[in-house]
Structures are given as C-alpha cells and as structure tokens.
Image (cartoon, rainbow, N blue to C red):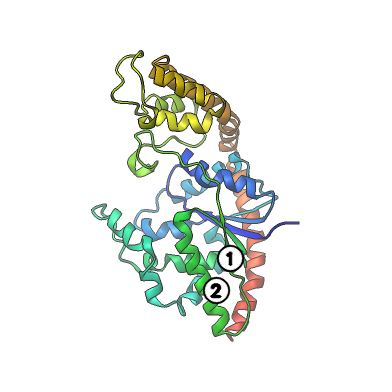
Amino acid sequence: MTKGRIFSGMQPSGRFHLGNYMGALENWVRLQNDYECFFSIVDLHALTSSYADTSKLQDNIREMAIDWLSAGLDPEKNVIFCQSHVKEHAELALLLGMMTPLGWLERVPTYKDKLQDLEGSGKDLHTYGFLGYPVLMAADIMLYKATCVPVGQDQSAHLELTREIVRRFNYIYNKEIFPEPQAVYSKAKVLPGIDGRKMSKSYGNTIPFGASPEEMWNAIRMMTTDPNRIRKTDKGNPEVCIVDKFQKVFNEAEYENIVAQCRAGEIGCVQCKKCLNAKMNEMLKEIHERRMELSEKPEYIREVLAYGAERAQKEAVKNMAEIKAAMNL
C-alpha cells in the first residue's frame, strides 16, 4: 500500500551533477518504495529558458534518463517518461492558463529573481512561456492527480501556486476534480561547488554525476581549502574548507577524527583530499559502473521512455476526459 501518488520532474538542461543527485534524485530513489511515482524529464520546461538553442536537447534527455536509471530508479516500479511525449501536458497547461490570474504569476518569487540572474546572458526571457511556466508545472502535477510533490524549501511557493490553481478550478467548475498536492520535503544533502559557491553548471564548479575516478580526482584536487594554512603542520580551520563539507557527507565514520587532525595540524590538505577521493569513489563506484553500462544501450533507454510514456498517457487521457467534461468541452 502506497502513501499516495507523486509527480516530479527535472529539466534536461545539461550534464547532471552530484549536487542534483544529492539534492533530489537520491531522495526519489527512496520515495519509489513508498509512493506511486511519476517522474518526468520535463523538456517543455527546458524550452522556457533555452528555446533559442535546442541542438543538444535530445542528447540531454537521453543522458538524464541514463542518470536516473543508474542512480537506482526502477522503470517498472515508477512511470519514467519524457514530458513532450504526452501531449496532454500542453493541453492541460493551455486550459489552466485560461483561468490563472496574471497577478499570481507575476508574484512568484523566482520569476523576477531569474530574470535578474540571466541579465546580460543574451537570453530574452520576457516571454509568455517563461512567465507561464508555473502553470505548466501545475498541469504536470494535476494531470496525474498527484497527491504529493517532493520539494525543497525554496520551491514551496511554486507548489502553493499549484494548490491555488487546484482550488480555483474545483471552485469554478463546482467539482472536486483535483486533490490539493502536499509537499514532501526532501532530506537533501546540500553540496557546495568545488569553489564554495552553489554547485552549478553555469559556474563550472560541479562534480559530474557518475564521474570516473579521474574526473573525481580532478575535481577534488581543485577544491578550495583554508587559505591561511600553508604548511601541513599549520593548524587548520575546517569551517572555511570545502573538502570538510564533502567529508561530512561522504565520510561520516572518520569525519570527527579528520576534523581533529586538521585543527591540530596532523593531516595535510593533499592527504585529506586523497582520503575523500577514495571514499567518494568507493561510495559511487556502482553508479559509475551502471552508468557506463547503460551508455552502451541507447535502444534500451528509448524503450524505457516509450514504455513510460505509454503508461503516463493512459492515465493522462482518462483524467483529461474528466477535466474536459467538467469544463463542458
């Protein structure tokens, strides 16, 4: 017996990194055992900010599917599919857009923030699609009558907008068509980038998900450490060291001892990095191997997405019939 139905998705906007995994995907793998899950590669959402260059879109979709499967998502246990393969997502977004007040969209906190963040990037985001992407997100969730959505604290405003749209639809058409989806707050481990800033592809400070041992070491050796520590015997300050943040996540058993050695000047930064490198490679070895294996099976990846789209569309068609009937369409 499951606790409810989950919908969640990720944009295929470039190579998946370890921060994405620890922040969301690791939690999805846990949730699949307790919920009925619909996980979508939301390529229509990717168009809201990258509509002008879609040359790598299909590659990104395939790579994201490989990432999800190598992390442990089961394509039999979950419905794993590409958003644009189920046309009802766009259809429901259009219908919901007819009744969503403009002011609701303009007050979404991340709307103006993202416009400012991308100012000077050459991207024109003053578009209908970018303003309306929360409606598309609501459609994604409502199409499957999802009861739960895994979110981080910074995404709660988006989910609340979906809940407002649900209430508005049910009130206008006087039918309880949609449940109000509840937040399932993820137990995410937040990883900084190797330079201390947020881990982001745009900063070039990421560790690729499924990194090879060589890629892993190249990233770890570039991590910033205590700038005041020059010699191994100098006493270190773990609070200002990026390696310390990763040791805490990937080397819990030895963490307290390493911190004590650092503060006493008994372990050097290079030695600490080598220890972290060994632990991270050990913990992520199976994911890397599965990813390498799946990368050689493009036909299997296509089959997984086709199978997921077939299952998703069966549910979408049934629910759209009920939605359109309520709207007298």
Q: Identify the mark at residue 181; answer none if there is no mark.
A: 1
Q: Is residue 232 above or below residue 10?
A: above
The residues tagged by marks 1 and 2 sit, at their Cα atoms, a distance apart of 9 Å
Q: Identify the mark at residue 255; answer none if there is no mark.
A: none
Q: Which residue is depicted at the point 54% across and 84% down?
A: 172
Q: Which residue is depicted at the point 35% across and 19% down?
A: 235
Q: Position of residue 15 (x, y in %)?
A: 45, 42
Q: Secondary structure at mark 1?
A: loop
Q: Say whether residue 277 is visible.
A: no
Q: Position of residue 200 (x, y in %)?
A: 38, 43
Viewport quadrant of the N terminus: bottom right
Quadrant of residue 324 within the rendered picture: bottom right
Q: Secondary structure at mark 2?
A: helix
In this view, the residue in front, 308 or 166, is 166
Q: What residue does disc 2 label?
A: 166
In this view, the residue in front, 272 or 301, is 272
